[in-house]
Structures are given as C-alpha cells and as structure tokens.
Amino acid sequence: MAPAGDAPAPRDATAGPSASAVRSATPSAGGTAARSAAAPRPEPTRPAPLRVAVVGGGPGGLYAAALLKRLDPEREVTVWERNAPEDTFGFGVVLSDETLGGIEHADPVVYRALQDAFVRWDDIHIAHRGHLLTSTGHGFAALGRRRLLEILHARCAELGVRLRFRTEAPPAADLAATHDLVVAADGVHSRTRDAHADVFRPSLTTHRCRYIWLAADFAFDAFRFEIAETEYGVMQLHGYPFSADSSTVIVEMREEVWRAAGFDELDEAESTARCAKLFAEALGGRALRSNNSSWTAFRTVVNARWSHGNTVLLGDAAHTAHFSIGSGTKLAVEDALALAACVEEQPTLAEALAAYETERRPVVESTQRAAAASLRWFEELDGYLDQPSRQFAFNLLTRSRRVTHDNLRLRDPDFTGSVERAFGCPPDTPPMFTPLRLRGLTLRNRVVVSPMDMYVAEDGLPGDFHLVHLGARALGGAGLVMTEMVCVGPEGRITPGCTGLWTDEQAAAWSRITAFVHAQSPGTAIGVQLGHSGRKGSTRRMWEGIDQPLPEGNWPLTAPSPLPYRPGVNQIPHALDRAGMTAVREQFVAAARRAARSGFDLLELHCAHGYLLSGFLSPLTNRREDAYGGALSGRLRFPLEVFDAVREAWPQDRPMTVRISATDWAEGGTTAEDAIGIARAFADHGADALDVSTGQVVPDERPEYGRSYQTPYADRIRNALGVPVIAVGAISSWDDVNSLLLAGRADLCALARPHLYDPHWTLHAAADQDYRGPAAPWPPPYRAGSRTPPTGRTDAPKPRLTLRTPSPGEPAP
C-alpha cells in the first residue's frame, strides 16, 4: 500500500458519486447490488468476471473488493497487500458528503461503521500575521486512516474476500493470465502501471514543495491554516482533527526553503521536533508524532489510458490530486463505486472498463484542475502574504475555484460580508459593481467586453455591424467595451476583414460608434485596442480557414525574425530593420492620435497572441542578434519604444493598458519570470493596467484549458507588482467575476464568448443578484425587460395527496 492521505475540502469541493454507482447499488433505483438475503438472485444474462485480483490494500482497493464481492457472492476476490493489516501511513482521512452518499447507497454496513467513527466540524481557522479569521458552514467529516482500514478489512472478511497481507502481488501479467479482472490499486508508485507503461502512457509531474505527514495528540476544533514566516522563507501548516483526541498535521514549504532550513539533513525524529517548534503557537506547545513519515514532493499522475486487457487502474495508480483539496481517498473510493457499477451494468468486461473510464475521467480531470490551482496557490503563498488579512483568507478559501463568492456567502454570510466591506463594496453591492478609477476615467463596474475580432470590415472601415455589435454590448451594462484589434496599417491586418485606423475616413466611422455609446449608454466607457498582425497576417477570415493564407491577394508580412507562423503554410515574413521599426512605430502613433479624436476613452496596446509586438517579446519568435533580441531587456526594447511613443501621443488624462501573453504554453517560451519582467517594464513606463492573456504565439502550444484557466497569470502579476490587472480566459459567470475580484486576483474581468451569447450579460448578472444600483442601470427603453419573463403556467393547483403504489400481491386501496 503506497503512502497516501487526505486533507479537508468543503463538501461541494468535487463532483459526487457516479450516477451509475448509485443506480446500480440501490434496489429502489432498479439496481442489483443491495439485494436482501431472502431475495432470489436473477439468472445472469452474461458471463461475469468470477476471479478478481486486487493489487493494493488501501481504501480504494479494499472497497472495490468488497463491492465486487457483494454484487456477486460467487466471485472469488483476492486482495494482495504487502504490509501488515495494522500498518498504515498518514493519519486522518476526509470524505465529502457526496462520497458518503454513494457509500450509503452501495453498502449501508460500511456507511454505518463510518458514521460511528467520524468526527465532524464546520469551521476553518486561518491565521495571518497576528489575525485569526474564522469561516464556518463547511461541513467536514474525518476519521483515522487506520480505523477506515479496519472497517474495510472487517467488511471484506465478512463478505468472504481473501486478504493476503505481508504478501507481494504476483506480476500484473501473471495475474491477468489467471484472473478475469485485475484491479491495480497499488498507489502512486504503481508497479502495475510501470509494467505496462507503453499502454497506460503515464505522465508524472513532481512539484516544487516538500511536505511531511505528522499527527498531534489533541483535536483541533476546526481545520487550521497556519503560516510561519521564517528567516529561510515561508512555511505552512494544514491541520484538522480525525478523532476526539488526534489531529493530522501537514507541514509544507518550497523546496529551496526546505533546504535552506536544513530539513534535508534531519532524520524523522529531528524533523518532527523541529516542525513542532516552528508551529508551537498553533499546537499550544504540544509535541508532534510521526509514523514512518518522510519529506516528499507531491507528484501529479495522469494516464492516457486506465485499462489494458482485463487490468484496470484505480485511485492513485490512475490519477493523483494534491492533498490540499482532500481528494486522494475520496477519488479512490468513488473509482471503486463506479468500477463495480460498470462491471455490473455492462454486457462485457471490455465495455465495463471503457464505461468506467468514460464516467470517471471527466470527474477526475476536473478535480485535477482544481487541485493544480490549489497546489500552485500554496507554491506561490509568499506572494499573497501582503494582502489584507480578510482578503488573504478569502483568497485561500477560493484558491481552487471550487469554492466561490456565491457559495461562500451562503455558507457564511457574516464572514463574506466582512470581506466585501473590507474590499469597499457599498451596502447590497456585489464586488463586480464597485467602481474603479484609471487616471481620469472612472469605470462604473468591473466588467469588460473583451476585444473580439469580427472580420467584417471593408478596407479597414467599421460599418453598421460594428455599430450594432459594440452598441449592443454597451447597452448591456458593461463598464468598459473594447473594440477588436484595430490595425495600424493595411499590411498589419490579420485578414481583409479587419478594422483599421490608418485613414481619417476610418476615424470618422469610429467616431460614429463612440458617439452612440456615449449618448445612448451614459457611463459606459469604450476602448480601442491597437495592434499589428506581424507574421500572423494575410490570412483568411476565421470561418474560412483560421491561420490559412489567402487564396489570392496576399500582402507581404513583417516580423522580428524571418520565421513563418506555420512552416510550409504561411509565408516567411521579412525581418524588420531599423527603418521598418521606425515606420511601424509611427503608424501606431498616427493611429493613437486618430483614436483620441474619435472619442475613445481608453487605449490598449496589443502585445500578445503572437502579433508583431508580441513577436518581439517571445524567445520563440525573436531570434534577433542585435539590440532588439537576446535577453528579455533586448526583446522588450521595441515594444517599449512603441508604448512610449503612443503614450506621448495619447491624451494624458486617458488611461492606457497593455495586453500581454504571460506564457506561450510551449517549451522554451515566455517564462513566469519573463511575464513578471514584461509587466514590470510596461508598468514602469506608465501602463495603467496589464491585460493578462496567454498563448497563441506558436501553433504547437499546449494550453491547460479549464474554467478561468488564464487567471492565475493575472493573479501572479498583480500580487507580485501591485499593478492593476485585467483577467481574461474562460471567465463565464458573475460568480467567477466576484470571486476573482474579492480574492485580489484581478481588478477587472474581461469576458468574450459570454457577451456573444448574451449582449446584456452584465445587466442580467445584476438582475440575478438583485442589484439595482447605479453601476448597472437599465436603459429606459429596456426597463420593462429587467425581470425574468415567466416560462410557463404558474397557477396550476398544487398536489395535496400522494397515493402509494401497492406492492405486488397487496390489494389496492
């Protein structure tokens, strides 16, 4: 059994048990799992696996064995566990209400035993620089890992599962030859997975913190986060009770802090004593104890496949998620529920294993995304310590993006209200409807309509489509509406349908749009994004073939270096010389002056997504050997020259922002340190905010897509530099916006696709939150639509009686 353990997570931190697990294991739902002793077993309709081998006697393996045996008592189920039954690693285990619900349906015997053993609590204590803050309503349940194993050992023995302790399992291939089903629950260091690595194709990532599992002989009265700011660096404690007189204590710190503090030279006893001394206040001066405890770095395990023939991976062998969201044992138990249900439901074993992976993989991937966000938060903990204590606490609680402003407000309205007041929210005002001032411009709310290329201009001229598109979003309530990338010259267009500002005629057309916004939606600001396509220009409109060159009429491209976007597809650009750079800079200046005359309130310089200025910033696209290449200072030189020239031409009372790609999502590209350096340079030169995006620099990028997946980059820049940031990237709900703002991860949130789906997204967000204040006024002609229209009849008589269906053989009432 591999070392494992769980730290707590709020009860809604991950998805609940599989529908098929509950369906299959619940008689009332038509399943076959929980039959009474007197009920006759129906004749099988298909061959079922009769011989089952389970490798690994951790909670996941034991529970899978018990369920498979319970579903079919004729099965011969054997568990191999190399350790003794009383051996275990780690201390406490936390299970969510969703997981317990699945266990309750699938095996009431195990559920009742767990209920008797659990300790429960609702509070989280967060200690931050002399302040102890408490958030309540979180609903935790934990028990000792040893007690959990005892319960599962007893259940397996009662059902007739063979438990072979102190016994190494035979090789996976040998078990597969002699058994119908092999369940590999052999942990993060799975030998089964390694033996068939060519099929499972595992990916293992080791992270930057070291941690150790310890225990204290007293019960914390809440989950506790404690921070020690030492001369070596920041260290943190995660603690929670798992019995009436015991608590799990996990101590964690960055690798370099761990080494600087000398932990790499201490034995187990010395490390334990040192940790107790470091966190003496949280522990009340009590000692800590260990149990084969050692410092380790967390490893994230991902497998391309979970099954091979009749062998299937389960729990940590298949996937891991960082302990800070309490998911290891929870995921393994839910895997066991789903696997047993799928074996019962599907006609063949191959279909059962495919169904198991299809059902569980999306849940696991979602959990791993949340765990990765939480893990990174703790790796970057020292960057948040200067936040005000209430904001820090809210940031910590919402770090994984599973807990949000809205559900935290439901759990603990007093705590959340105090955070809102500290943020500066007026009474009854959600964070997203608080104003923000940038130079002489005050934005009435924090919602931005993100720049979105429309590709419908003629010769760079915006027309009626742009008036309606931007005007509709302005009427929809956003604080700031941004144009698409407006090109500074005809050769700087992405496609023939891109807008421009290289002529006075274009400027006049933009004046028509800004005048409409200012007149018809007073208080809404409209901003222009200026850019040059660089090597990504002269392509078809998106829906005609994204990034594909035009069938005819292509124009020559320029870039920092003569590197085509797609070799063999896109043309090789001409590398800009000094005269070319000067000409481009002057195009930006001329466009900025026209933008000012056109009435734009804000100007954004596009230095992202692989376009010309972004091409200078990324080491993947800038291979110059002159003063404009090489180290970051050289790569920044031309974009800063353009910024300075535009800033001088742009009215001083109007704000100017810069959009950057904070990562290229590709090896050898922009690093986290580069992103901080780029942001710092633009801020030092007078940027009023950084619009932090990612990627689109090289075609072979590998983004880590997911909800709000780009926001950690904005978060890092904001908290490292203290500059305002605009967060973008799969922000889809007003709850996300409120959460990001209140946690101090962003100052503004830019949304694109939600505004395509709903031009009135901001007004509807206000209505959903019962907000009727000045930050989101409905235009007078639209006020009648400010309430959700009814969707069906609401005056039907309510049912008063429910008649029970008689059981078979029972006379009707």
Image (cartoon, grey):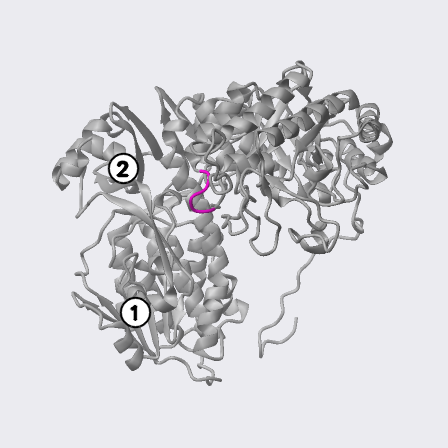
Of the pair 173 and 87, the residue shown nearer to us: 173
Query: Along the horizontal axis of the image, is 441 left or right of 572?
Result: right
Q: Position of residue 530 (x, y in %)?
A: 67, 31
Helix or strand or loop: what does disc 2 sit on?
helix
Asked if residue 539 shows in the view, the reply is yes
Q: Nearer the viewer, residue 776 or 731?
A: 731
* Residue 387 pos. (x, y %): 44, 23
**Residue type pointed to by label 2:** Glu
**Residue at x-position 84% and y-position 37%:** 463
Based on the picture, tell me whether residue 667 belongs to the magenta stretch.
Answer: yes
Q: Where 458 falls versus 577 (above or below)?
A: below
Q: Point out the stretch of residues depicted in magenta.
A: 666-670
Question: In the image, which is nearer the foreground, mark 1 or mark 2?
Answer: 2
In the shown orientation, is residue 551 left or right of residue 633?
A: right
Residue behind mark 2: 255
The residue wearing badge 1 is: 54
For residue 696, side relative to residue 383 (left or right): right
> Hey, what amino acid is under mark 1?
Val
